[in-house]
Amino acid sequence: MALSSETIAKFSRVSTATLTTQLFKRGLRNVFIQDVRRMSAASGNLVGEAFTLRYIPAREDLDQLSVFENPEHPQRKAVETVPPCQVLVMDCRRDARAASGGNILLMRLKVRGVAGVVTDGGLRDSEAIGKMDFPVYGAGGSAPLNLAIHHAVDLNVPIGCGGVAVFPGDVIVGDGEGVVVLPEHLADELADEAVEMTAFEDFVMEQVHMGRSILGLYPATDERTLEDFAAWRAANKR
């Protein structure tokens, strides 16, 4: 089920904090990828469906530079086959001792129209990545190439990234806080509710700036809060 342009637009203007709250209400708690932060200059939200790449620990007799001559090598194949508008999510077992990619591969993904990259491993050429206008999330810079620590094995299978289960097609949303993973079947309703929650929190923030107590305001347990919010929405066309 491809994301609609309307749902993508909604996710592009809500925070991962808001989305984790919406998921918490549904009993989903382990949804925020740990120890992964934005590494590039991209300022907008990352939004797209997950296309996964899985690594296992490297083995010296298999992981030689010559493997990159094979166009079917999973890392190389992933770079050339991730569909446009999807997100390449890599499972490096939370091991950042070696890079899971670098700026050349990332530039290829950007040129191909991929939405962005998320890895719980390291990335080399991190200074160059820091200047890229392309959403890249990782565990930090790491100069050694992937073959030193990682052996690429599978494409588009269920993986773990930063301690979170990621299934192909899951919705990935990233912002300055980090990356959240959303089950695909909940995408549309989560987008709608996140937009609503964002509007309410903008109203709350305005009220707090004006000196109003959070009691009865956040959460909205006071009837007057809902009345004031309705008036605020009408005045602000929200």
Image (cartoon, rainbow, N blue to C red):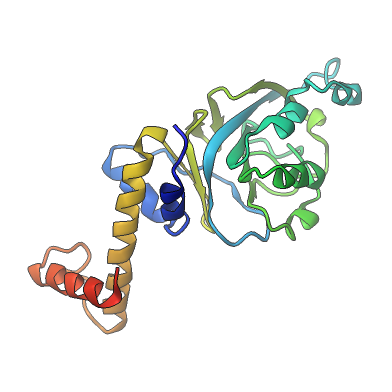
User: As rendered, which of 36 and 174 lies closer to the eye?
Assistant: 174
Residue 75: percent from the left, percent from the top?
A: 74, 29
211 left or right of 109 in image: left
For this orientation, the residue located farthest to the top is: 61
For this orientation, the residue located farthest to the right is: 66
Q: Residue at x 32, y 81 (%)?
A: 209
104 left or right of 116 in image: right
155 left or right of 230 in image: right
For this orientation, the residue located farthest to the left is: 223
Q: Residue at x 77, y 29 (%)?
A: 76
Image quadrant where one finds the C terminus: bottom left
Residue 84's place in the image compared with 59, above or below, is: below
Which quarter of the figure has residue 77?
top right
For this orientation, the residue located farthest to the bottom is: 210
Residue 168: percent from the left, percent from the top?
A: 52, 28
Which quarter of the figure has residue 128?
bottom right
Residue 60: percent from the left, percent from the top?
A: 84, 19
Residue 39's place in the image compared with 92, above or below, is: below
Which quarter of the figure has residue 67?
top right
Q: Residue at x 14, y 67 (%)?
A: 226
User: As rendered, which of 74 and 92 lies closer to the eye?
Assistant: 74
User: As rendered, which of 136 and 195 lies closer to the eye?
Assistant: 195
